[in-house]
Amino acid sequence: MRLTYFTLFFAAIGNIATFLPWVYYPKGNTNLYGYVGDGLITGFLFVLVTVFSFYELYKKRDLQLNKIISGIIGLLMLILAVNNIFEIEYQKSNFETDNPFIGAAFAGFTQGIGLYVLGIGGLGVFLFSLFGYLKCRSNKETTQSKKLNIVIPLSIIVLVIGIFLRDKIFTGSAPSEEALSAIFKKDVEAMGKCLITGDYDCFIDYNHPMIVQSYGSKSEMKHLLNEAMRTFRDNVGDYSKIQFQDVEQVERKGKNIQAVVNQDVTIVKEMNESIEHQKVLAVSEDGGHSWHYINLSGMDRSRIEKYYPALNPNIKI
C-alpha cells in the first residue's frame, strides 16, 4: 500500500500544476495559467487518480485496473508536458502571426513552471502505478523486492528532478572574458557574412527570438530585412565587411549574461569606403552556452526594452 501513498502524492503535485503558469509573457509581465486551457483537463485526470488512490486505501489493497488506468493517465500527462515544453521552445523562433500587435505583445514568451511540475506529477504517477501493477501481479514478494518497488521509481524521479535543477539553478562556471571575446568574434563576423551575402535565414538565426517574434514571423522579418537592405544599398551603399572590435561591458545575473559588443561595419559606395561603428547586445540565457544578438544602432534603452524587457539595468546603452 505504500506505493499508493506515493501515487497520491504525485497526483497532488499534478493538481497543483493546474494553478501554476504554463506560459510566461515578459512584455506584459503576465502568465497563462494551466486552468485557462488544457490544465482543466489535466486537473480532472489527476483528481481521478486521487479518487482511485483513496479507494485503494479504503479497500486496503492494490487494484490492478486502478493501477493500469492511473499509469496511463500519468504517462499521458508526462507526454503532454514534454510536448508543450518542446512546442513552446520551437515556437520561440518560429512564431507566426499576421497581426503585428499580437507579435509585439507575445514577444519573448517562454515556458512556465507549471509545465515542469505537470511533467514531474505525471512521471511520478506513471512510475508508482507501474510498479504497483507489477506488485499486484506478483503472488509473493520478498522484503528486498518491496524496497525496490519504492526505491527504483523514486530514484528515477530524483534523477529527472536533479537534471532539471542542474539546468535551471546551477549556472556552472561562466565563460572568461577571453572566451567571450572568441565567441563574439566568431558570431559577429559569421552573422555579418550572412547579411552581406544575403543569407537572411542564417542572419535571423543569430537574432534574439524576441526580435523575430516582434515582427510576427520569421518569414515577415526576412521580407522586411530584404526590403531594408535594398533601400540601404540604393541610398547608402553595400556592406563589404563586418568585423568584431571588442567587448565593452559584460553583466551577469544568474544564468543570464548580457554584453555590449563593438563592431565595425565597412560600407562601399561608388568605390569609396566608410566605416560605421556599431554596438550589439549579446544575450545568453543558459550561462553562456548559446547566444543571440540585438543590434543597438539607433536605439535607446526604452526602445530596446520594448523588444527585450529583461535588459539588465546595469547595461549602458
Image (tube, rainbow, N blue to C red):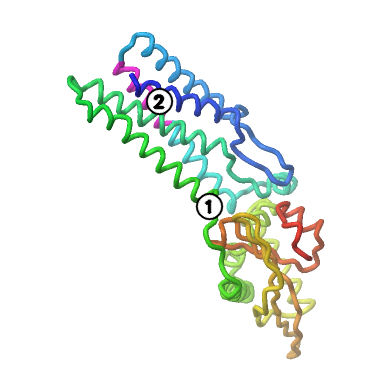
Can residue 114 be seen at all in this image of the molecule? yes
Query: How many callouts does the rendering have?
Result: 2
Q: Residue at x 82, y 62 (%)?
A: 300
Q: Judge the density around disc 1: few (<14), some (14-19), many (≥20) Cα neighbours within 10 Å.
A: few
How dense is the environment of label 2, judged by Cα within 10 Å: few (below 14), some, or many (20 and up)?
many
On screen, residue 254 versus residue 75, left or right, reads right
Q: Secondary structure at mark 1?
A: loop
The residue shown at (65%, 56%) is 253
Give the residue type that dot 2 points to: Phe
Q: Residue at x 52, y 35 (%)?
A: 117
Q: Going by the image, does 129 lie left or right of 188?
A: left
Q: Quadrant of the N terminus?
A: top left
The residue that disc 1 covers is 170
Residue with the mark numbered 2: 6
Image quarter in which the C terminus is found: bottom right
> Which three-letter amino acid code belongs to the residue tagged 1?
Phe
Numbered badge on residue 78: none
Question: In the image, is residue 80 above or below residue 274?
Answer: above
Residue 222 in view here: no
